[in-house]
Image (cartoon, grey):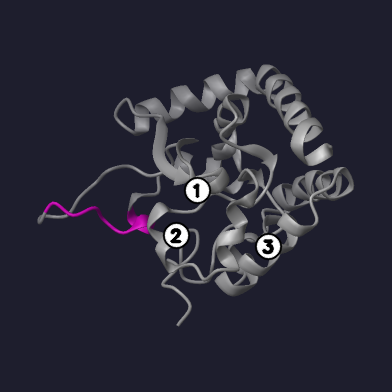
Amino acid sequence: MYQYFLKRLIDFCIALVSLLILSPIFILVTIGLYFVNNGKPFFFQARPGLNGKVFNIIKFKTMNDKKDAAGNLLPDVDRLTSIGAFVRKTSLDEIPQLINVLKGDMAIIGPRPLLIQYMSLYNKTQHRRHEVRPGITGWAQVNGRNAISWEKKFELDVWYVDNVSFVTDFKVFFMTFKKVLKSEGISAEGHVTIEPFNGNN
């Protein structure tokens, strides 16, 4: 009953209340990023959700669109703005995803929605991460976030799918605050966030 009804109801209420409480921060960050990103404070990207259904995730835009002489985007580390770095370090870039939760695209707790192109690289077990709604935070995020390997991340995601409960979500919810305050696991070694997933080689 929790997974199929109560979880969605709780998610909606938390997202609505959180947006109201965080609205002053939301507005300030939007204004700051509007100026550093040439009028583009938000980042939209197609991601696979529940049962692989595609939706547009909403995040604060922490990197600009600067390109090299050939017209290619510069590396992430060169495009990360000073405000963007702060927003990412404090996890404020996740706030707009509360809108995704209200729409039903996401949950508060669940496997993080990854890139669409990764789906063809998953093995059968890894595909199981799409049996639940993706989340703003999840079991993998409170157990290493971007600092752990892809193999471990998928293992934790599938564990969550098999162990969805109010107790598990309650634990993840409060562990997330600890991780955010300590700014742990924000990036993999040598990367702004995490290295790309290249399959199970």
The tag on residue 119 is 2
Image quadrant assignment for residue 91: top right
Q: Is residue 190 above or below residue 62?
A: below
Of mark 1 and mark 2, the one earlier in the sequence is 1
Residue hosting label 1: 52
Which residue occupies the foreground of this view, 107 or 54? 54
| Residue 93 horizontal/vertical position (percent) | 54, 38
Label 2 SS: helix
Q: Dot 3 surroundings within 10 Å: few (below 14), some, or many (20 or more)?
A: many
| Residue 147 horizontal/vertical position (percent) | 61, 67
| Residue 149 horizontal/vertical position (percent) | 58, 73
Of mark 2 and mark 3, the one earlier in the sequence is 2
Which residue occupies the foreground of this view, 14 or 40? 14
* Count of numbered marks: 3
Magenta stretch encompasses residue 160: no
Residue hosting label 3: 158
| Residue 39 horizontal/vertical position (percent) | 32, 25
Q: Amino acid at mark 1?
A: Gly
Q: Amino acid at mark 2?
A: Met
Label 1 SS: helix
On the rendered structure, is 123 left or right of 22? left
Magenta stretch encompasses residue 74: yes
Q: Which residues are magenta?
A: 71-78
Q: Residue at x 16, y 55 (%)?
A: 68
